[in-house]
Amino acid sequence: MKLSKILAMSWEGMSQRKFRTSLTTLGVVVGITAIISLASLGEGFRLEIRERMQTGFELENLTVIPGSFFAGLSKEGFIDKDVQSISNISGVKVATPLMQVGNVTLYNKNETVRAFVATAVNFTEFVKIFPDRFIFEDGKLPTEDRNDTIVIGYRVNHPTENETAPFAIANDNITLTSRVLQINPPNPPFYKQENHTFTVAGTLQKRGTPGITNFDYWVFIPLETARKIYNTQESQLIFVKVYDHEESERIADEIEGLFPPFSVTILVPLTFIKQVDHILTVVQIFLMAIASISLLVAGIGIMNIMTVSVMERTREIGILKAIGAKSRTVLAIFLAEATLIGITGGLIGVFTGYGLSHVLAYGLSGLVQTQQQDAGFQPPDAQRMSINPAFSPEWTIIAFVFAIIVCIIFGLYPARKAAKLDPVEALRYE
Amino acid sequence: MATILEVCEVRKNYHMGKVVVPALRGVSFDVEKGEFLAIFGPSGGGKSTLLHLMGCLDRPDKGKILIDGSNILKLSDDKLAELRLTKMGFVFQFFNLLPRLTSLRNVELPLTIAGLPEKETSKRANEMLKLVGLEGRMDHRPFELSGGEQQRVAMARALINDPKIVLADEPTGNLDTKTGWEIVELMKKLNKEKGQTFVVVTHDPHIAEAADRIIHLKDGLIEEIKKAPRRNKQ
Ligand SMILES: Nc1ncnc2c1ncn2[C@@H]1O[C@H](COP(=O)(O)OP(=O)(O)O)[C@@H](O)[C@H]1O
Ligand SMILES: [Mg+2]
């Protein structure tokens, strides 16, 4: 029997019981809708997170921190030789040390501001690491030969939102007060308050970068100056910029190899992003597995309905067999029915899934936004979280094929039952 | 005359739980090519069982059924289906048409199953329906037809694959006497014109009288085989 005729026959059988067939198909529609919408929302969510992380993390920048999460040899700080060794690794564009000064108070005439993160850097190298974020609102990058310059982050310079005048502008002379640890054996160590005068080289634009290096709250002074004031050659961080972020994991391994085991920690944005991506994938698969259950339920529905239908059509099957239809022809007619339900339900499900995911995405985006406004730590300019469902053709096809396969698998039992019917028994059936 | 079908010592039991119901208890006879044979006897005598075996719908427990010399016991289910499709035509007491198909579609069904192109199937179904006198009922569905008309459609379906043997199980059993006779006349006519072999099961002696030969079946055994007097005279 020709396939077209088999399909026509199945179609007739289905259209004769429209209501029942529709309900059976509806089960498949619901299953596929759930799978498609969860898959596309999950994918959209993942893409949004990835994009945010990629803008939040500078992928080319690695941060080397002394010590590690494991107990072990903890390194106090880095020396210039460490920085030099890192610079020599192939693929490293620039490596620069950063010295933490702690929190300081700045005085400009009778204005006072506090900066919680005061750091000492080599400006020329540092700007190479953060070219996008070390951008001046006023003034410019200090030159190497000056040792009394300071760069002030936006939030330090504008402590309150509605401040009209900034704390300082370029070329202001300001006083920096900090505490310096005095070690003078045999006396116990103590902190001594020290004042130093700096000239403002420039103030930074607002960036609002989330993460640990939000320069808005930072002030920067020349590294050499800090080394003299604090009488140390050590630095607490090394920033590394690589040429190609794809290489960052390899380079991180090489950097780690320069130090004793477990004595440094290297923050590799790519690794972090990969891990988050991995977690999101697992979550997504989990969601889809749950959604798939609804498709299995639909499959059981198909099995149920088709078994009833085979019983109702026993006599018809007997007639078909009596006039010469082979078992496999009968099997094909019933499997075709299951397949048609799968195709129809799958197709409708794909479209309703697309529709539903847009509706859900709209709702979710609104929800995320409201919560964001409540969160105090978020910079006010954080853009609205918008989840756009991402439809991958692969997943759509996989879901669609899955629907058909489920239908065929669950249709197989009743179809085989029909195919195995003994024609004589079937003809006697009332 | 050549033998088209041989029944040799055929036995068939049905099992209802532990009870064994003997339906055929050793039946032997030949069917000649082009013959119009009646199987006659009381209800429960095993007529339908015998017809089903002759029509390759079922296999005997013991004995042989040879169609054109080959034993159907040795054939697979698929081969039997093929035999039914190409060599057999069935007519049933309750017509057994597919209710949602038109007369035309019902008649062309065997050819459709055989995989013939639609152009040919509908052309031949058309001719068949004309042959049984139903040219005006092509697009009617079974419930829109009278019993006699439905049985004519069934006849057309049985004949469309140009079968060697047409097997009819109480074809008049569900029709009034007049309509029943019309069906018998139609079968006689086709038998004469096309030379096809007819085996008709009936419990009606008048219908049986119309056949060339009558096999009396009772309690699963052949009581007697007799040639119809009219035929003898010819
Ligand atoms: N499927 C079956 N299961 C059990 N008994 C059956 C079955 N088919 C027929 N029989 C029994 O076999 C005997 C012959 O039946 P059947 O061939 O239908 O007779 P007829 O057609 O002459 O009325 C009867 O006693 C009937 O009850
Ligand atoms: Mg009977």
Image (cartoon, rainbow, N blue to C red):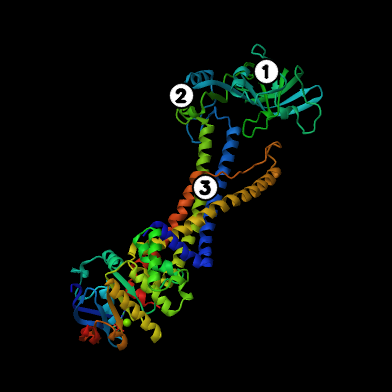
Q: Are marks 3 and 1 in contact (CB under 8 Å)?
A: no
Q: Are marks 2 and 3 in contact (CB under 8 Å)?
A: no
Q: For the residues tagged 2 and 3, is the chain the same?
A: yes
Q: Residue furthest front?
A: B234
Answer with the quadrant where ligand 2 appears in the image: bottom left
Q: Secondary structure at mark 2?
A: helix
Separation (CA) of disc 2 from disc 3 = 39 Å
Figure disc tally: 3
- Relative to A307, is B48 on the left or the right? left
Indicate which disc residue A284 carries: 3
Q: Secondary structure at mark 1?
A: loop
- Relative to B92, is A273 on the left or the right? right
Q: Secondary structure at mark 3?
A: helix
Asked if B33 appears above or below A301 in the picture, the reply is: below
* Residue at the image position 52 percent from the left and 40 percent from the top: A277
Query: Mark 1 — residue?
Result: A141
Q: Are marks 2 and 1 in contact (CB under 8 Å)?
A: no
Q: Nearer the viewer, residue B98 or B76?
A: B98
* Residue at the image position 36 percent from the left and 75 percent from the top: A427
What x and y, as percent, mark residue A392? Answer: 52, 43
Q: For the residues tagged 2 and 1, is the chain the same?
A: yes
Work out whether residue A195 can be spotted: no
Indicate which disc residue A258 carries: 2
Indicate which disc residue B25 carries: none
